[in-house]
Image (cartoon, helix red, strand yellow):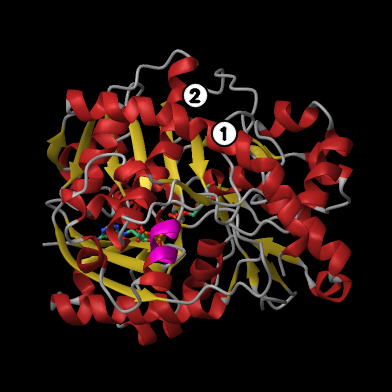
Amino acid sequence: MKYVIGIDLGTSAVKTLLVGRDGAVHAEATREYPLHHDKAGWSEQEPEDWVAGTIGALGDLIASSGVAPADIEGLSFSGQMHGLVLLDERNKPVRRAILWNDTRTTEQCREIERTLGDALLNVTRNPALEGFTLPKILWVKRQEPEAYAQASRFVLPKDYVRLRLTGELHMDLSDAAGTLMLDVARRGWSTEVLEAFGIPHAFCPPLVEAGACVGTLSADAALSTGLAQSTKVFAGGADNACGAIGAGILSPGLTLCSIGTSGVVLTYEQDASADYRGKVHFFNHGKENAFYAMGVTLAAGYSLSWFRNTFAKGESYDAMLAGVDGIPAGSNGLLFSPYIVGERTPHADAQIRGSFIGIDGSHTRGHFARAVMEGITFSLNESIELFRAAGKTVDKIVSIGGGAKNPLWLQMQADIFKADVVALENEQGPGLGAAMLAAVGCGWFPTLDACGEVFVKHNRVYRPDEKTSSRYAELFGVYRQVYGQTAGINHSLYAFRN
Ligand SMILES: Nc1ncnc2c1ncn2[C@@H]1O[C@H](COP(=O)(O)OP(=O)(O)O)[C@@H](O)[C@H]1O
Ligand SMILES: O=C(CO)[C@@H](O)[C@H](O)COP(=O)(O)O
């Protein structure tokens, strides 16, 4: 049997999947790496940690599978979006990467709005948000002029790992769409945006399709991973584009919910005609000439991982959540808003922070854990409501990401979203999507759609329970008031954060 590998460069870890021509996942290997939060609102990672983690995970994958390297025909990538990696002329990073969930760039966002005016939405199809790449470039230019002076070009996280494995420098359209420098509908770097900020075209890498073959592994990469040097390398895409591919969101009518570090609700768009006026993100898909719209909760899985690290250190998620299914919907009147690193959809606000509201002497740690899961899901439901208000039918949602490992959370999604929630056999949608790009690139299938028929395996369907659903609908009305009622207080507290 022949195989391909999907590499998902996530925020918490790099996850690798070995997938056979039969579409079955034959082996998995993961390596975690740290996040650095040196100041409130800052979030950075060491590009070298991604490279070491990827090489280590690929080595583990081959060793644990026992598959002959010569039988692995190709590999591709899914990458956390927007992160700025500045490279010098020898392609060495000049500083740590500034990530998608870093919100230090509010001033630069206002500068982008002032400078571009209407062109911002018309060309990039997105508003200026702190997480996107262009504001980060402007921040480094202003705050760290020495680092900026050393930078010859920029790439996004998975592009840097690909560069280190192949020696080739590229960026794919689905990831470039998240930089705020791409003309999304025309599918090229926007001269208007680049000129407005004095960024030379040579600063931006050559653009390719997510499925493009960019070469093979370098001799060094083959040696350090144990893979054959002849392994074909395909560009890969943004993690949400790849998550959509891996969940079979390849035609209109299907919706994706991903609970990773961030949380995402995404719908397929056949062309660039839909106009959400910046209320949700609008990006190029990893499938050629297609697009997607999505709402983002900045701290979805991250809120639960923060809760675990702070109040249940050393416990697994399953241990921490044992018994939480016995607590009634609504956590006995305890409500959580997951704004612990700021928010994007529907409240683009870098200064807002989270809250527990309604704490009662009877509440246990279990109530708090359940409230965190409910608050995250309410936040995602705000994006679903935005799509419904725009006329989309949302009655079937494919759920992926670490959050989809927990059956209680999948049922909670069905109850809160008032829609059928479908789990995949393997919840690693982005890694599977990357493997599908490699499988199509290797010529195993004529299209991603054909590949999806073999690779995408739906598992159990969670249907909304009428009684629980209507209880949650009532509570969602209360949740919706939290942002407005706490925004002023949080903005005043901003001055007290380090
Ligand atoms: N067993 C579990 N039960 C509930 N949630 C989980 C479980 N395992 C992981 N998670 C959630 O999934 C998140 C990680 O998801 P993942 O898709 O791996 O993230 P990323 O791609 O950002 O690295 C964690 O932060 C946590 O909230
Ligand atoms: O910023 C976004 C999308 O706009 C995030 O979705 C990142 O792409 C990170 O994804 P995960 O690590 O949570 O998968």
Q: Which mark is residue 370?
A: none
Labels 2 and 1: the sequence-earlier one: 1
- Secondary element under disc 2, as helix, strand or loop, is helix
Judge the density around disc 1: few (<14), some (14-19), many (≥20) Cα neighbours within 10 Å. some
- As drawn, 197 above or below 71: above
Instruction: Pick the residue in front: 173 or 233.
Output: 173
- Secondary element under disc 1, as helix, strand or loop, is loop
Which residue sits at x=45%, y=82%? 52
Which residue sits at x=73%, y=56%? 494
First to last magenta residue range = 302-307
| Residue carrying label 2 | 386
Judge the density around disc 2: few (<14), some (14-19), many (≥20) Cα neighbours within 10 Å. some
Quadrant containing the C terminus is bottom right
Quadrant containing the N terminus is bottom left
Residue 102: give x, y in percent of width and height: 64, 59
Instruction: Pick the residue in front: 220 or 393.
Output: 393
Which residue sits at x=36%, y=25%? 474
